[in-house]
Image: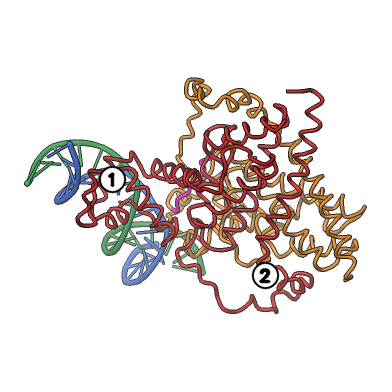
Chain colours: A red, B orange, C green, D blue
Amino acid sequence: MAKGDRSGGNASRLNRAVIIAAAIDFIDEHGLPGLTMRRLGDRLEVEAMALYHYVPSREALLDGIVEVIIDEMRDDPDVPDAPADGWQEFVVKLAHGIRRVALAHPSSFPLVASRPAEAPWLRPPLRSLFWVETFLDGLRAEGFGKEAAADAYRAFTSFLLGHLLLEVSVRGADIGPLDVVDDGEEAGPEELAEYPNVRELRSQLSVDRSQAEFEESLEHLMERMTLMRDEDGAFGP
Amino acid sequence: MAKGDRSGGNASRLNRAVIIAAAIDFIDEHGLPGLTMRRLGDRLEVEAMALYHYVPSREALLDGIVEVIIDEMRDDPDVPDAPADGWQEFVVKLAHGIRRVALAHPSSFPLVASRPAEAPWLRPPLRSLFWVETFLDGLRAEGFGKEAAADAYRAFTSFLLGHLLLEVSVRGADIGPLDVVDDGEEAGPEELAEYPNVRELRSQLSVDRSQAEFEESLEHLMERMTLMRDEDGAFGP
DNA sequence: ACCTGAACACCGTTCAAGT
DNA sequence: ACCTGAACACCGTTCAAGT
């Protein structure tokens, strides 16, 4: 970052980080299915084959993307790495941080959500040892026993996965056709004739309540976490 | 099903349903990335090009798979289409029904979870008008107002998506490399040196608690739903 | 009426060769 | 040291031709 960065043209030297960053931008612009080694090469003004000197395969590239996206959160000044004012504030800030990451990369986030897990203790979307450690350590420091911390971690990840994947998938692309044609019509009422409740609640369900939903659900999750802590407290840390 | 089914060999006539069924079996055996029009043709003892007479494209085939998998639930005798003994029992039975579907098709379920939603009122994994209508109608019949039913639907789908996708993705395949090599070693403790809490809770997090987790989380979801019903009740249906 | 062969425009990936 | 060209074994999809 300091020296050696004599970027005269846009042709800075190729390396893993540059490739992954370009891939993320590409996905955010053209969707996941559009990402091709050859097209990514074009974007970097290089033949596709040159990429293989820095990334062993397309699969490895996708794993790299997941890693980098999650690590972004470490640079977010609003995401703490330890509780400062109680575990609840800590958990809320973590949740908001991950949500910000998801919304910043709506087309890449499904990758974070659904690449195969490497281990049972790295549950999506909290897929990095750093953040899992941070979460567990924070809760234990605030009086959660071992069981309670583990249970809280499971509940937290399920909550995040469900909410964020839904939010992002309603907002836009995923794996799928390149052209997400959002036809102007509202799914002709004639085919909703047999579904009166859907018809009636349709507009209500179309309203974007995702932010409020997230906050409410998070609130209830923390009530559950309180119970977990108190129950486990009996058996002690 | 009654006549016209003179299947002498295994070469019954090609049609959309047969193709989709074969595709589901194929995915459950070889994983999603292994599904290819050409290989699916092989399995059906037909050239790949023949499939295009019944299915317009690979994308459409994937959509068909989602549809068929969800419809399986209609044949499940343990899944009611209206509340019989209160809304709570109704919701529990629906949840268990969808969980059974997910566990029956661990490799196809990610498709149900993450194909782009067609409309905001068809939230994964409850992706059929029939089931959305059934859910909304059941709750309204049990005294849920419009708002409450819509809120409950949102909370229910988020819950299902998070839990089931996690459960299925820990269990196995998804999009990704064909060979999910589960290396015998337990992720060498040396790399966990900086992550003491992860190391300590590792075995705890490896225990499969998904069934219990599902039940507990569902229980709390229903408490939330009770609140939704009572709050909305004030404004009435 | 239903399926096939041949072809097109793409893929990921390997490897010897260029500069 | 770093990238390219050419090639291989695959893809999805179209369409005229076969039976």
Secondary structure beneath dot 1 equals helix
Mark 1 vs 2: CB contact within 8 A: no
Q: Amino acid at mark 2?
A: Ser
| Image mark 1: chain | A
Residue C13: percent from left, percent from top: 31, 41
Near-viewer residue (B97 or B183): B183
Find residue A143 and report its image quarter: top right
Mark 1 to mark 2 CA distance (whole Å)? 43 Å
Q: Residue furthest right?
A: B85
Q: Which residue is mark 2?
A: A206
Q: Is residue B139 visible?
A: yes
Q: Quadrant of residue B105?
A: top right
Q: Is residue D11 left or right of residue B206?
A: left
Q: Chain of mark 2?
A: A
* Residue A134 spot, x, y in % from top left: 58, 35
The disc label shown at residue B34, or none: none
The quadrant of the image that shows the N terminus of chain B is: bottom right
Label whose residue precedes the other's in the sequence (1 or 2): 1
Quarter occupied by residue A60:
top left
User: What residue is pinned by disc 1?
Assistant: A51
**Residue B33 highlighted magenta (yes or no):** yes
Residue at 60%, 66% (x, y): give it: B118
